[in-house]
Amino acid sequence: MQYSRISLHPISGSLGTIVEGVDLAQPMDDETYAEIKHALLDNLVIFFRDQNITPQQQIAFGKRFGDLHIHPFIPALEGHDEIIQLKAKSGANDNLRLANQWHPDLSYTNDPPLLGILRGVTIPSRGGDTMWVNLYKAYETLSEPMQSFISGLSAWHDVTKTYRRQELQSEGGPERYRMTYEKSPPTLQPLVQVHPETGRKLLYISELTTTHIEGLNPAESDALLQMLFDHLNWKELQCRFFWRPDSLAIWDNRCTCHYAVRDYDEPREMHRVTVIGKVLN
Ligand SMILES: [Fe+2]
């Protein structure tokens, strides 16, 4: 596609591009929206700098792409149910590695969302980058025998995978765990999926929530999952974004995992809206 409204400045060889030429505080015409959507499907994650927009404007921008999601667990920004407020706190949870493992958002639900739209509000003076990995390339760089072995297999995704053990040993934890499990029981997701808009195959896996592969015995499942998690760590499959206040990222949650690098000890606050549905508007 020839872009006339926007210009693209890729940040890695595998995915991710900075988009210039757009002011998200202004109403957006259909041609500009169509170019942004194309850039997103083509680059998997797109970034904008210097977008000093209000929560209402972030919500309105998200609604161009589809209906918005209300998160089952993460608290909303006061007065704005569609925005979740991601505030990093140093302390007890740091060792649990929640956002700093490779994951798509909400893969443990029956209908994982299409997009995340994240805006930097308070950014540490150093550190706090976010990384993304290209799940098409993750699939394509497996050998053909491995591609055919995992095609047709499905894996369980469980929101409690990372913190279950600590929760079960803490005061009141077993009851909280039971409520979480009832609200959001594990889901089975195919390991190899076809993107509904691009038609490309991808490896769908989450270091954060994937617990085991259906039909394999535990040793087989553990070994295969470890190999696949390690595969996401190939630097050639990734990009890394350095935030500034008012930077905004949009990622295709169907074909990427992300990883929030936890290397800072200053306040960090991000606002996310999440788009649901089968395909983008
Ligand atoms: Fe996330």
Image (cartoon, rainbow, N blue to C red):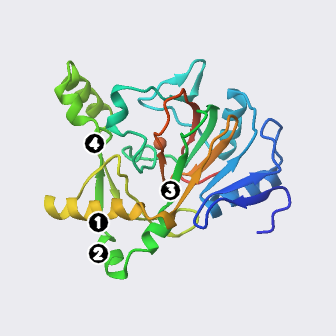
Instruction: Say left or right for 43 vs 53.
Output: left
Quadrant in the rendering for residue 161: top left
Q: Which of label 2 and label 1 is nearer to you?
A: 2
Asked if 265 appears above or below 6 in the picture, the reply is above
| Residue contact between numbered discs 2 and 1, judged by CB atoms under 8 Å | yes
Circle number at residue 149: 2
Circle number at residue 153: 1
Asked if the beta carbon under badge 4 is closer than 8 A to the nearest atom of ligand 1, the reply is no
Q: Position of residue 218 (x, y in %)?
A: 14, 58
The residue to which callout 3 is attached is 256
| Residue contact between numbered discs 2 and 4, judged by CB atoms under 8 Å | no
Q: Amino acid at mark 4?
A: Lys
Q: Which of label 2 and label 4 is nearer to you?
A: 4
Q: Amino acid at mark 1?
A: Leu
Q: Which of label 3 and label 1 is nearer to you?
A: 3
Q: Quadrant of the N terminus?
A: bottom right
| Residue contact between numbered discs 2 and 3, judged by CB atoms under 8 Å | no
